[in-house]
């Protein structure tokens, strides 16, 4: 490998390390059951802070859409990294994972682990079914590659056969990876660019798994296009003159805005210029992600397993850039932040199809588990999406998505900390259906947007709703927030039209 300036950190020099490093590569944990050779493989590419407006710059993702199913009403349980990723791993809402923030008492890696969530992820389930499981890239906020968590070696969570994970990989250079209990430093050379490193390791994982005739699940979780929006060297000159989209919501407040937003004045010329620069950098930074997807799919073909592999692409949350007079950020209940791409391609999936059902990130874990012929526990709040991707009708599907956010999020050590100008909403819960968005804030304020006539969410008509309608929405939201099992959350997901 052409990586330069590597060093093993002193914190990893412990008894047995030399023996561990001798494996090629070392394994975090090996599955014990022997699976059938025909079990489908799963590749899950999860990107960071990617909004729908970047998909047009991702030809590999558009190709994936032409070969698979695109879910047009896919939303996250919170537009914030750690709560969303926790829901993805477990299939549970934040009120069940206990992860509402990126750190502190309400979230982060420490809370996720401390509440036992690591023992009930899709990885532990599939590894128990004989799958080789691999995780590459970004795990959860607060995870540190060298941290032993009280053990002898740098910590690797249960369920993962192979583990190549960074802590602060946002700059794409000068970071550490926990490579199966061994911490390795990557520097500032072009070959050290993190997304490219993940691409190489992903291809290698696929090649070795195919050679072993072992079904696998591989999650590749990039830091791109999260700030500071660092492109690979070869992409630095891409998209000259590109600017942030001037949608109908750009530099406009909705009518009757909530108090956390109401004081924002028009964007300044400097703010608009910065937004334009950053949008261009975001488009540049996802070029390496697009090549990663192409490289992984090419390896599937070379290894002869493309026809037996599901490829899933999504983002942990969206991102606003100028909408609602907010500079770059997330965390709100607006569609810019909560509605993100989900594309699924693979055996039996209808090519070029679109599904408009209300689906969420809690649905990914049960989908992966059912692909692997594993049972889904009753504690899982989500539901298997594969029948939808394969074209089945779903007349009784849920009608509402639940979004749960704790705020404001202004911790100095949080890479996602935001101020009033970025958008720092107070705690809220929200319902999103195919036609409306309803939000209840902890201070009693409400938002209601009828997206059939107001798709950009610029007219908050909550104050004009009838008392009967307000009560029905409040009761439906309260029931959803209180659900704690597969059946209860499925029932609660059928909200008023």
Image: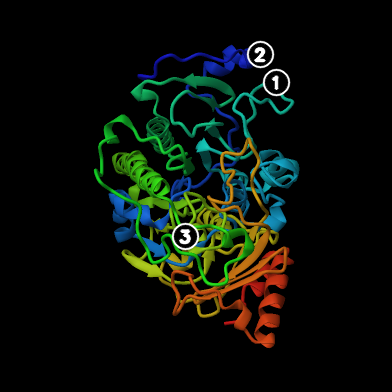
Q: How many marks?
A: 3
Q: Which residue is mark 2?
A: 14
**What kind of element bears circle 2?**
loop
The answer to which of marks 3 and 2 sits earlier in the sequence is 2
Q: In x, y percent, where is residue 223?
A: 47, 39
Residue 186, numbered label: none
Cα–Cα gap, marks 2 and 1: 7 Å
Q: Residues within 10 Å of mark 2 (few under 14, many from 20)?
A: few
Q: Quadrant of residue 237?
A: top left
Task: Give how far across and how far down residue 403 sits, in percent.
Answer: 61, 62
Q: Is residue 167 above or below residue 476?
A: above
Mark 1 Cα within 10 Å, few/some/many (few <14, many 20+)?
Answer: some
Q: Nearer the viewer, residue 143 or 383?
A: 143
Q: Position of residue 159 (x, y in %)?
A: 61, 40
| Mark 3 → mark 2, Cα distance in angstroms | 47 Å
Image position of 325 (left or right of 381): left
Left or right for 88, reference 442: left
Disc 3 target residue? 336
Q: Residue at x 39, y 28 (%)?
A: 193
Whichever of labels 2 and 1 marks the residue nearer the N terminus, that label is 2
Residue nearer the viewer, 274 or 177: 274
What's the distance in space between the residues labelled 1 and 3, CA to CA? 44 Å
Query: What residue sits 45% from the left and 79% below the top?
Result: 452
Q: Which mark is residue 152?
A: 1
Q: Secondary structure at mark 3?
A: helix
Assign a secondary structure to mark 1: loop
- Image quadrant holding the N terminus, namely top left
Position above or below: 85 against 13: below
Q: Which percent across, then down, holds residue 346? A: 38, 56
């Amino acid at each position: 490998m052409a990586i330069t300036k590597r060093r093993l950190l002193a914190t990893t020099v412990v008894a047995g390390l030399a023996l561990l490093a001798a494996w090629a590569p070392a394994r975090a944990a090996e599955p014990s059951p022997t699976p059938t050779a025909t079990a489908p493989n799963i590749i899950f590419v999860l990107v960071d802070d990617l909004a729908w407006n970047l998909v047009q710059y991702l030809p590999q993702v558009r190709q994936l859409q032409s070969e698979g199913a695109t879910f047009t009403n896919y939303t996250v349980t919170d537009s914030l990294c750690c709560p969303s990723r926790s829901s993805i791993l477990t299939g549970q809402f934040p009120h069940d994972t206990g992860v509402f923030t990126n750190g502190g008492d309400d979230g982060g890696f420490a809370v996720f682990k401390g509440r036992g969530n690591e023992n009930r992820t899709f990885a532990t389930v599939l590894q128990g079914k004989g799958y080789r499981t691999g995780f590459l890239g970004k795990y959860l906020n607060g995870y540190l590659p060298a941290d032993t968590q009280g053990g002898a070696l740098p910590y690797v969570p249960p369920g993962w056969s192979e583990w190549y994970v960074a802590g602060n990989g946002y700059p794409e250079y000068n970071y550490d990876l926990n490579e199966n209990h061994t911490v390795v430093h990557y520097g500032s050379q072009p070959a050290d660019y993190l997304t490219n490193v993940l691409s190489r390791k992903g291809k290698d994982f696929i090649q070795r798994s195919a050679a072993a005739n072992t079904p696998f699940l591989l999650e590749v979780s990039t830091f791109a296009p999260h700030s500071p929006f660092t492109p690979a060297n070869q992409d630095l000159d891409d998209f000259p003159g590109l600017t942030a989209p001037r949608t109908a919501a750009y530099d406009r407040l909705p009518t009757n805005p909530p108090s956390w937003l109401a004081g924002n004045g028009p964007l300044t010329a400097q703010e608009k210029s910065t937004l334009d620069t950053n949008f261009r950098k975001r488009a540049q930074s996802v070029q390496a992600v697009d090549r990663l997807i192409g490289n992984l799919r090419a390896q599937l073909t070379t290894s002869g397993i493309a026809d037996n592999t599901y490829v899933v692409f999504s983002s942990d949350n969206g991102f606003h850039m100028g909408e609602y007079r907010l500079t770059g950020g997330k965390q709100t209940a607006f569609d810019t932040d909560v509605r993100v791409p989900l594309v699924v391609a693979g055996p039996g999936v209808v090519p070029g199809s679109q599904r408009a059902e209300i689906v969420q990130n809690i649905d990914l874990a049960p989908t992966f588990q059912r692909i692997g012929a594993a049972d889904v526990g009753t504690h899982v709040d989500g539901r298997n999406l594969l029948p939808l991707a394969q074209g089945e009708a779903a007349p009784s599907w849920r009608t509402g998505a639940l979004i749960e956010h704790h705020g404001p999020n202004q911790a100095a050590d949080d890479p996602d900390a935001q101020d009033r100008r970025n958008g720092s909403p107070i705690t809220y819960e929200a319902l999103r259906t195919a036609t409306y968005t309803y939000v209840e804030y902890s201070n009693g304020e409400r938002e209601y947007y009828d997206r059939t006539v107001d798709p950009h969410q610029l007219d908050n008509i909550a104050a004009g709703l009838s008392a009967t309608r307000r009560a029905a929405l409040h009761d439906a939201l309260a029931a959803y927030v209180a659900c704690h099992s597969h059946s209860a959350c499925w029932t609660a997901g059928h909200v008023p039209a």
